[in-house]
Amino acid sequence: SEALMDELYFSDWYKAGKQRFRTSVLIMLTQKPLKLTAVDCVIVSNDMLIA
């Protein structure tokens, strides 16, 4: 996704070793987004909490 590409681009990937970088990418790819619902009708997102 675009968010993953942004995270990879802005990370210090050039400072990390190959194995650490691969592990970090694998963790990012396998994480499920947190989804909160309010009264079963509104999905609360990170953007909503930050604003």
Image: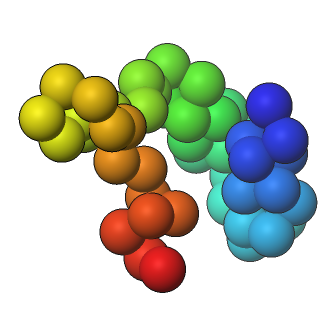
Q: Residue shown at 33%/38% (left/top)?
A: 42
Compared with 14, 2 (above or below) is: above
Residue 36, image quadrant: top left
Residue at the extreme bottom of the image, as rendered: 51
Q: Residue shown at 73%/42% (left/top)?
A: 4
Q: Nearer the viewer, residue 6 or 47?
A: 47
Where does the image place residue 46, in percent across and percent down from the top left? 44, 58
The number of callouts visible is 0
State left or right for residue 44 relative to residue 19: left
Q: Residue shown at 55%/35% (left/top)?
A: 28
Where does the image place residue 51, in percent across and percent down from the top left? 48, 80
State left or right for residue 37 relative to residue 18: left
Q: Nearer the viewer, residue 40 or 11?
A: 40
Residue at the extreme top of the image, as rendered: 30
State left or right for residue 16 relative to residue 14: left
Where does the image place residue 8, in percent across and percent down from the top left? 78, 53
Colour style of the rendered protein structure = rainbow
State left or right for residue 46 relative to residue 6: left
Compared with 18, 14 (above or below) is: below
Residue 20, image quadrant: top right
Residue 33 is at least partly visible in this image: yes
Q: Nearer the viewer, residue 45 or 15?
A: 45
Compared with 19, 29 (above or below) is: above
Q: Nearer the viewer, residue 19 or 42?
A: 42
Residue 26 is at least partly visible in this image: no
Where does the image place residue 13, in percent across and percent down from the top left? 77, 60
Q: Residue shown at 42%/24% (left/top)?
A: 32
Compared with 31, 47 (above or below) is: below
Q: Quadrant of the N terminus?
A: top right
